[in-house]
Image: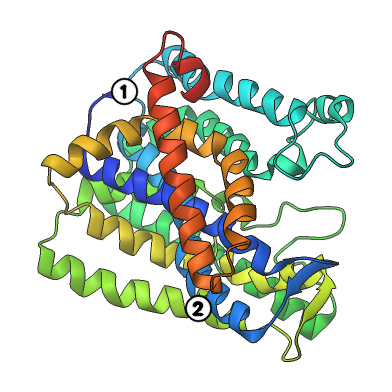
Amino acid sequence: MENQRVIFLDYLRVMACFMVMWVHACEPFYLGGLGTYIANSYDAFWVTIFDSALRCAVPLFIMTSSYLLFPLKVDTASFFRRRAVRILIPLAVWSLIYALVPMWGCSEGFDWKQNLANLTLNFNMHSGHLWFVYMLIGVYIAMPLLSPWVEKVSKRGEQIFIAAWGVTTLVPFLHQAALALFGRAEVYGEANWNEFGSLYYISGFIGYVVLAHYIRTHIDWSWKKTLAVAIPMWAVGYAIAALWFWSQIPTEYPVNEPIDLAVLMEQSWRFCSIGVAMTAVAIFLIFKKINCAGALYRIIAPISKASYGIYLMHMFVLVAVLAAVSAWGLATPWTILLSTAITFVVCSVVAVIISKLPGGKYIVG
């Protein structure tokens, strides 16, 4: 079942991969300087427009992975063995590459010995996109525990869990409200000595795992109903993500503030926040209706199979491409889009080629 091709998942996986690169191509236009740097309102506008629509890429990756894997169709040992080959070995390979090889223009202050030491506890900050893989490993560890539950739970029971999880997507905003009203950000049992509040155990990316199962098991709508639900859902989610981010940007430019400002701006972009969740579900519902296996799919399928490797390597390429394209003097949106497109094409070609080589699965998954 894990190797079965589901057409819409391949399209969705490739799109999510492109979206991640797009997100990272936006970052230099609001991160920098003291931590948060926005040169002008034009950059602020395009970052808001683009990035608010793209943050659902990570939830979409979780949902595409969960759609076939959850609940488990094999024994736990076999599941973990396959995931180790598919996920852990390429992670180890690329973690070492990022630790030992500086990216374009990043050799100053590069300390490979310290980078290797850091890997004993976490990813290195210059390969920050690898946070996703650590999170994904945690999701996979939880799947065998949740599989018996989801196989026995009723449709209503699953709906109740999803609704409760939906409440947790409000937590980033509840933290801000608590801070403004009471001077402390903790809510519902959280404290500086306890981060495990009452919403903790039903929060996070596990919600997307259950959502993927629910959509696969209980939703088989017509195109008309799908669009009637998904389009308003996406529009509302996008508005939440964009309006909050825009509202937190200072009105005087250039903005050069500590990183704390960017963290505040990104509250509505958090991957398990309400706006991002709504856009992710809406896109997933629409893509579920796609069943086109024509000429385009013959291009999409091998890219989808190599998408993990594309994700792992893309920062090496993107940093160099952004530096080159930025020197061309293009307007901000074109710099972002062109850098994303070039990076995607280069990484796709390289990852697909590697995947066909002996032992390639240990590099690109």
- Compared across the picture, whether 341 is left or right of 31 comes to left
Q: Can residue 204 be seen in this view?
A: yes
Q: Residue at x 63, y 46 (%)?
A: 320
Q: Which residue is drawn at 81% across and 53% down?
A: 194
Regarding mark 1 in the picture, which secondary structure is present there? Answer: loop
Characterize the local packing of mark 1: few (<14), some (14-19) or many (20 or more) Cα atoms within 10 angstroms.
few
Name the quarter where the N terminus is drawn: top left
Residue 286's place in the image compared with 132, above or below, is: below
Residue 142's place in the image compared with 113, above or below, is: below
Q: Which of marks 1 and 2 is nearer the N terminus?
A: 1
Q: Which residue is drawn at 64% across and 48% down?
A: 319
Give residue 315's quadrant in the image.
top right
Q: Mark 2 points at which residue?
A: 240
Give residue 36's quadrant in the image.
bottom right
User: Percent x, y for residue 314?
Assistant: 54, 40
Q: Of 78 and 58, which appears nearest the observer? A: 58
> What's under tag 2, amino acid-wise?
Ile
Q: Name the residue under label 1.
A: 73
- Distance Cα–Cα, label 1 vs label 2: 37 Å
Indicate which label's residue lies in the foreground, 1 or 2.
2
Q: Residue 166 carries which label?
A: none
Q: Residue at x 53, y 65 (%)?
A: 335
Q: Of 143 and 23, which appears nearest the observer? A: 23
- Compared across the picture, whether 262 is left or right of 294 comes to right
Q: Of 306 and 3, which appears nearest the observer? A: 306
